[in-house]
Image (tube, rainbow, N blue to C red):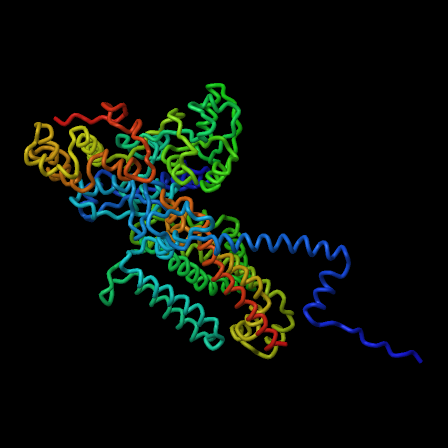
Amino acid sequence: MEAALRPPVVDTTAFGWARRRLFATPVDTIVTLCFGAVVVWVALRIVDWTLISALWSLEDGQTCRDAAGACWAVIEARGRLILFGLYPYEEHWRSTLACLAIVATMALSCVPWFWSLKRLPALWIGGFVTFVVLMHGGVFGLSVVTTEQWGGLSLTVFIFCSVAVIGMPMSIGLALARRSKLPVVRHVTSVFIDLFRSVPLLTILFTAAVVIPLTVPDWAQGDKLGRVIFAFAIFFACYQAEIIRSGMQAIPPGQEEAAAALGMKYWSRVFDILLPQAFRNSLPATINQFVITFKETSIVTIIGFFEIMASANAAVGTGEWGAQYVEVYFFVGAVYFLFVFGLSRYGAYLEKRARLTHA
Amino acid sequence: MMKRFTSALAGAALAAAVSAPVLAASGETVKTIQDRDSLLCTGHNGSYLGFAEVDDKGKWTGFDIEFCKALATAILGSPDKLQIIPVSWAQRFPALQSGDIDVIIKVTGWTMGRDTELGLQFARPYFIGPTNILTRAELGATSAADLEGGVFCINAGTSIERIVADYMGAKGISYEALNFEKAEELRSALYAGRCDALAGFGPFLAATRFNAPNPDDFVILDEVLALEPEGIAARQGDDNFIDVINWMVSALLMAEEHGITQANVDEMRANPPSSSIGRLLGATPGIGDRLGLSNDWAYNMIKAVGNYGEIYDRTVGEGSPYKLPRGLNNLWSKGGLHYTLVLD
């Protein structure tokens, strides 16, 4: 008989973990100390620049030259310009409310209770109507603000949401059409998707904003912002369609055949069997696509829209604040981070939820 | 100063424009503006130092914007009857052709290609854009030749690259170019001492110097590497509109020549010291009728924005952070290149 092996003694305290993982051998110790020193040094530099040596506001006669670290006074002076762009100063409250309305809509549509074919469209129509009424005005005694004057964070969030909301259903349609049994539908969709994917986004947006007014009669042009959002949405849909299609390919064909054998109709098979699983399969890639799209909204500066990146450039593009671009980019970076990090966390939550319900 | 990629895009858009019928009405721009009761003028997608900036309250200011205001006042009687449409460099020409804007006042160089192939018509230059050199004061250089063998920071993909190469090549001065994509990178490189000199558009250099940790460490050399006459551009085929713009610029210069300012314009109009000033300010009719405008347009304009010198000082000159010397943008009588047309 062999003597039973005693279970290894594991020191589970932080000290024990550190000794096991960081200081097990002399080489480990050296590596830990070297990298630890670098990390601490960088962290201290950042904390020093952003907080300790930073100048938060300017006293009389002080300038940003006096700051040893960051000069956050630029955000105090130019922050409203960055957040609201060219929107009329007295009406900034409208832009704030509109932005909150659309962010609230975004947040609510993340709640599973809203995930039905009736509730979700109703929520988004409500959100968009609120946004446009507040931003554009012209009703309830609000003065009219044309889309040329929209700007800053509200515009960035609006473009992102519109692109996602218009693009998602479009992408599902394209994905289904590309799997269609009808050769004409299948081939036309393939060509369409490949065509849009092979052209840079910038070119598509430039065409929508600048070339269409030259070639299409006035009455058919619509608003410039509308055209750009629609073009962006098509671009988004072409990429997203392929992501959803990959999610569909991963489902064994037997499932659909079995459903058909049971007499389920096409749309029932799509909505009850295909799409729920396709979404789950393609979730990581979809979140990726959303994050990319959020960041790509800054491309619209090239066609003269004052979204947050353009207004940040406007904020530092003066003699007075020209040296404070690092602070301003830092600020804008933090705003982007807030949204993108929120999106990724939400994606992680969805994945966990999918695992729980469909284990 | 336009980037190659965006100019390629603009070219593609205009190729489409030329093949398609141009929809914006030409020949009647002034009437279109009057019917709309608002002038659509160019802004920027961001800020362009000194020329089109956005203030803390989201209002446009700057040299180009003042000219937009002057034109709006000349045609419509008030500087507020103006909408500044933000457009990027690449977008300005197609935007003009499609009628999104009425006029381009956006530091736009008068080049042959733009004048002919792009279907633009330029009015007389309203700004002479020099390419200069900003260098470290400690080097003691007074001309480009003193910077022999030095490192030049240059904005990649802009016309500056070619201008510097041509100029230095012609003079046989060797140099090392260090290219950067963004203005911020250029500046930090200079401040950090990675280059001895920065070549660029005069106003940009003035701003770079102003923003330096210690502006006295840097000097702008008087030497001019190249000149770019910046003109106000409108659609081809509208002579009357071009006339209005030419006389607007001329009236602003004439006001400066005769010492007419925003402050004394009322007095000058009540007691014109000479008959030509009387004609300019509309005390004697003629200046408006012949252009299809009101006879007091020049008076209104000077009352609203001041004369050329006042606009310059307020936006890019001594009264601004940039302190850009008048240089070639002075009147001919003070050593510059600007002159007035004859008001008969």
Residue occupying image coordinates x 73% and y 60%: A23
Q: Quadrant of the C terminus of chain A?
A: bottom right
Q: Is residue A227 visible?
A: no
Residue B144 appearing in the image:
yes
On screen, residue B232 above or below A199: above
Q: Residue A310 placed where, x, y %?
A: 40, 50
In the drawing, does residue B154 fall left or right of residue B256? right
Residue beneath the point at 10% across and 28% down: B276
Q: Nearer the viewer, residue B138 or B50?
A: B138
- Location of residue A342 in the rendering, given as x and y in whole percent from the top left corner: 50, 65
Quadrant containing the N terminus of chain A in the rendered view: bottom right
Q: Looking at this view, is B175 or B222 the one in front?
A: B222
Q: Nearer the viewer, residue A25 or B75?
A: A25
Indicate the position of residue B135 as horizontal and vertical percent values.
Answer: 44, 30
Is B266 situated above or below A309?
above
Hey, which quadrant is residue A255 in on the image? bottom right
Q: How many marks?
A: 0
Q: Decide if residue A300 is on the left or right side of residue B276.
A: right
The residue depicted at 22 percent of the width and 33 percent of the height is B249
**Picture layout, residue B279 above or below residue A27:** above
Is residue B318 shown left or right of residue A169?
left
Q: Nearer the viewer, residue B74 or A122?
A: B74
Determine whether A89 is above or below B263 in the image: below
Residue A234 relative to residue B129: left or right: right
Q: Position of residue B83 (x, y in %)?
A: 26, 48
